Image (spheres, rainbow, N blue to C red):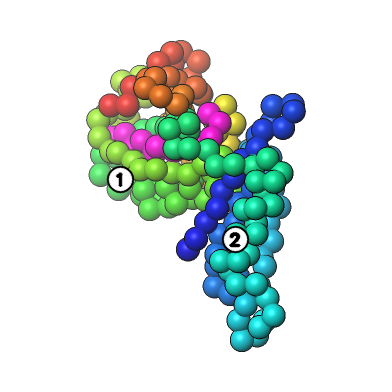
Amino acid sequence: MAMIKLYMRDDDGALHYREAWTENGGVHTHHGKVGTRGKSRFHPTRSRTWPDKQTAADFLRTFREHAEDDGFHEVPGPDHGWLVLQCWTCSPDFSHPDDRRLLDEGQEALDQHLGWHGVGHVDGNDIGGTPPDACDLAGTVLNLFCRVVDTTVGVKVVRSFARQFQLTPYHVIGTREAGDSPYVLAWSARKRDTGLQLF
């Protein structure tokens, strides 16, 4: 699958995305304001059914040219921020039903949610350590790391994911700006939490 993802900041400071990727039989385009689902459309490309259509490669080239003419450009990897969704599990081996669902479905669901809101994607995870003592959980810790183009918007999108996925309340969100800055706590349901440990 070939994919193009471009961004533009408007005069009010809002970030917008335009992206396109190949699918069987055509190209899917998706555009909107970062943090929103935006609008998407499927475009058939040249095939035996559609011999007069552009090829997928030609469509993507034209798509990029038009987007760049409108001020859109790629955001280089080093300019992305990072976000971590840290979940504390009820069981150390993910045997609890909520933990199993999180392990089996959570990462893919979060990746899709971030992508459809134009803010970024999941870029790995780690498992280990123990939840904070105050939680009184006998489980472990799952960190889902996300590369994002805007950490503030990213936190809002991850919070909406947590609601839609019906994630248990045992989670926090941390952010790290581009560069070598450390992760800091960005959101917690517990007001007494003031820091973030990746365990």
Looking at the image, which residue is at 56% across and 31% down? 150
Q: Mark 1 points at which residue?
A: 94
| x then y, percent, for residue 154 | 55, 33
The quarter of the picture where residue 11 lies is top right
Mark 2 or mark 1: which comes first in sequence? 2
Bounds of the magenta span? Answer: 140-151
Quadrant placement of the C terminus = top left
Q: Name the residue under label 2.
A: 60
How many marks the image carries: the answer is 2
Query: Crowdedness of circle 2 by 10 Å Cα count: few (<14), some, many (20+)?
Result: many
| x then y, percent, for residue 42 | 66, 65
**Along the line of sight, the residue nearer the viewer: 135 or 73:** 73
Looking at the image, which residue is at 60% across and 81% down? 47
Secondary-structure class at tag 1: loop
Q: Is residue 74 left or right of residue 92?
A: right
Q: Can you see residue 94?
A: yes
| x then y, percent, for residue 43 | 67, 68
Mark linked to residue 59: none
Secondary-structure class at tag 2: helix
Looking at the image, which residue is at 67% across and 33% down? 9
**Residue 12 lies in the magenta stretch:** no
